[in-house]
Amino acid sequence: MESCFCTRRVLVFLISCLWVGMEVIIGQTENSSVVLVSEEKKRVIDIGALYTVNSAIGRSAGPALVAAIDDVNSDTTILKGSMLNLVLQDTNCSGFLGTVEAMQLLEKKIVAAIGPQSSGIAHVISHFMNELHVPLLSFGATDPTLSSLQYPYFLRTTISDYFQMNAIADLVVYFGWKEVVAVFVDNDYGRNGISALGDALVKKRARISYKAAFSPTASITDLDNLLVKANLLESRVFVVHVNPDSGLNIFAVAKRLGMMGSGYVWIATDWLPCFLDSLDTIDSSKNDLIQGVVSLRHYTRESDLKTSFKNKESSKFNSYALYAYDSVWLLAKALDTFLISGENISFSDDPKLQENNNTTLDFTSLRIFDQGEKLLNILTATNFTGLTGEVRFDSDKNLINPAFDILNYGGSGSRRLGYWSNYSGLSIVPPESLYAMPPNNSITSQHLYSAIWPGETTVKPRGWVFPNNGKPLKIAVPYRISYPEFVTKDKGPMGAKGYCIDVFEAAVALLAYPVPHQYILYGDGLRNPSYNDLVNDVAQNKYDASVGDVTITTNRTRIVDFTQPYMESGLVVVAPVKQSKSSPWAFLMPFTWQMWGVTGIFFLLVGAVVWILEHRTNTEFRGSPRQQLITIFWFSFSTMFFSHRENTVSTLGRSVLILWLFVVLIINSSYTASLTSILTVQQLSSRIQGIDTLISSSDPIGIQDGSFAYRYLINELNVAESRLRILKSQDEYLQALEQGPSGGGVAAIVDELPYVELFLASTKCSYSTVGREFTKTGWGFAFQRDSPLSIDLSTAILQLSENGELQRIHDKWLSHEIGCSSQTTAIEDSRLSLKSFWGLFLICAIVCFVSLTVFFCRVFFQYTRYSAEDDSHHNIEQPEEPARPSRRNLRVTSFKDLMDFVDKKEVEIKEMFRRKTEDSSRRHLERSGTDLPSPSS
């Protein structure tokens, strides 16, 4: 209801302003409209055209509209029995006169209007079009806020600036820039276009650092003042979004101010090629103003239809002429469908205007197009191929497949760097060749040819300089009380000193440009400041940066940018320690009890396996049961010292022994090394073994004042806040540790490693770190988000690390010698467990198993052969014996017989097989002799 009231109020106000004295202002209505086509035999359908005739767009669009009308009326396949009549109204580059002309146009009972080119006029007259149901096809109004929801009868037949600004954002990010200065005309077209650019840049983690807006009627002096102010800023990337007819004034002023030289970047929207393409010739004075400028132009693919249009047009034209031509054909095809469906064109009075017609103003001439909604629906559903390519609308009433040429002006003309499309971003191939492929907008897939930048250089400008406004960087420095070696107050001219300050100054000295800065102490000097508050103040633009011992944490990186870490850090636990006394059982310490147990089992196992494999072939492994048992134990444990006297003769036995001796060698070496470490290295023990034992206890924990460790223990490790004790100085560290939990002190302190190393240097080995670092972080310099200084200083810090300067600064401030070990070496940490050797034991077990399997398969084969031959011999000797259980069957079931066979020597088995073979052969010969007839018979 509110929008309806506002629309009505705007309508009444404009009509009342425009109607009074209209003939005095603009003359006779009949003289301001031009009937371009008339023919008595056909039904005439009036369509309107709104644009500024004497403008860069109008000079191209006007002839294109006339050509389109002629082509439609001469085409016998469309609008049979009807013809289009174009009624032109010149908006004269004026919002006021443009609105007046639109009012006069609506009196002509037009079924649709083509135009306007001005986004501001389009905003105003769209209210009239909505009320009178007249579709408005605009080939030049690119303001992205002209949406189909607010203005349902507005249909944009060109590319919205929403897509153009996304293309510029991709271009900015492609070249690695983070900030731009927007120079734009302060009207609907300029403001809303730059607003879309800001939104697009934010999505890419970039931003508009300054908006330099000027009035549409601004003078050269106004532009001069505007650019002088912009030139004092940090960014050197300028995006120019202005009207085509006056846009070159920006570059003229910039050239005079020296802003078109090396180091500057100028990106122009499509207004620049729109203006240049409409000129018959470009003189050298204009060409000199745009050297190195990058610009966007609507991309329209080459086609026979486009070539034919070029050949017919005698004058130069820009891309808006193509969109104007296609707009006429779009309307013609929609009207053809509309008439074929049997619809008639009719108009009726607007009851709302009749109700308000209580004045002398004549509202009756403004009538509603009854079939306007039907025609609008047909327009949005129409699909054809025109000069600009495929003309089709998506669900938001935007043309599909928006694309732009990326142009670079240099020399006497321009060259194409590549293309941008909403489908796949920046590329060096035409967009239509990518539509058949899956969309890919990843950074690695974006490509452009190299550009020539202002100053005739191919080196990509850095895009920013240190601001030339006389304001140094405001750098917050922590005013520390404890550990002043890192950073603290200084009475010198800089106001601060310490390790962190020296690193920052050395890094700044490596930059290729000066960085004026001043240090501002952060804190009251009574206690360490809160580093979280310090980082938040940088993020909120209270300071430009922070230099000090600022730890890089995940939460902080979300709000500020950090440089490369210049100091490695991490949280450790400091606790009281005492030296461990030597134990008479120290020789058992190298291995855990599990390791001792498994090692003993494998000694016996390997001895038993070797005995089994060698028993049948090696006399040294035979004898009485007692002697053999002693041999197994002796052989097993003598291999520990490689002193076994028994020789192995079987292949399987040697394989097992060789592998086992290798395992023994590894175990002996590891045992010796571990025992040496235990007996020779100073052993420090502590009740607290690390962060896990500290958390599981209920003892108080000391935390340095201002450290991030306070919140880390609470939020990440779930330590109760009541257990934490804030310690403000190194003296409080010592006092709290000496008192211990029972005396009101702490059991241990959790702090960062650089602080701990300084603390331990003065404690005479009474305290030490226990366990390992349980976080891995570093210290860096914090800057506001997207600050280019963070990148350059990161490179400088790497250079300091490579050339050794960083280590020299470290030795200057932090070279305190620590007289004892800075970390406890607990005996448990030195003991070797089974997990370090289970692979060796597994391999040994597999070899033993395979060897035993092969051995028993061989024995089983021999036993089967032995049993078969014995059975055959028995059958020959007793052929007449009645069937009854044989002794062979009894032997098979007898385990004792099997063991007796296994216990036999290998030589005996072979001799037995040999004798049985001979006996069998002899018996076979005897049987053969008995069966043959005698020679005498």
Image: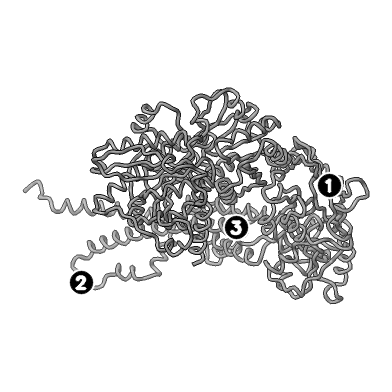
CB atoms of marks 1 and 2 within 8 Å: no
Tell which tag, 1 or 3, sits nearer the viewer: 1
Separation of residues labelled 1 and 3 (CA atoms): 60 Å
Mark 2 and mark 3: Cα distance apart in space: 61 Å
Query: Amino acid type of disc 3?
Result: Phe
Q: Disc 1 residue type?
A: Gln
CB contact under 8 Å: marks 1 and 3: no
Name the element at disc 2: loop
Q: What element carries label 1?
A: strand
Q: Is residue 339 left or right of residue 379?
A: left
Q: Which residue was labeled with disc 3?
A: 837
Near mark 3 (Cα within 10 A), the count class, few <14, some 14-19 or many ≥20, is some
Horizontal and vertical percent position of residue 570: 73, 57
Q: Earlier in the sequence, mark 1 or mark 2?
A: 1
Quick check: 374 left or right of 781?
A: left
Percent x, y for residue 678?
76, 59
In the displayed image of the protein, which residue is found farthest to the left? 937
Tell me the crowding category of disc 1: few under 14, some 14 to 19, or many 20 or more residues within 10 angstroms, Cα based.
some
Q: Residue at x 75, y 35 (%)?
A: 512
Nearer the observer: mark 1 or 2; the answer is: 1
- In front here: 791 or 866? 791
Secondary structure beneath dot 3 equals loop
The residue that disc 2 covers is 883
Residue 412 location, quadrant: top right
Q: How many dots with numbers? A: 3
Left or right for 698, reference 636: right
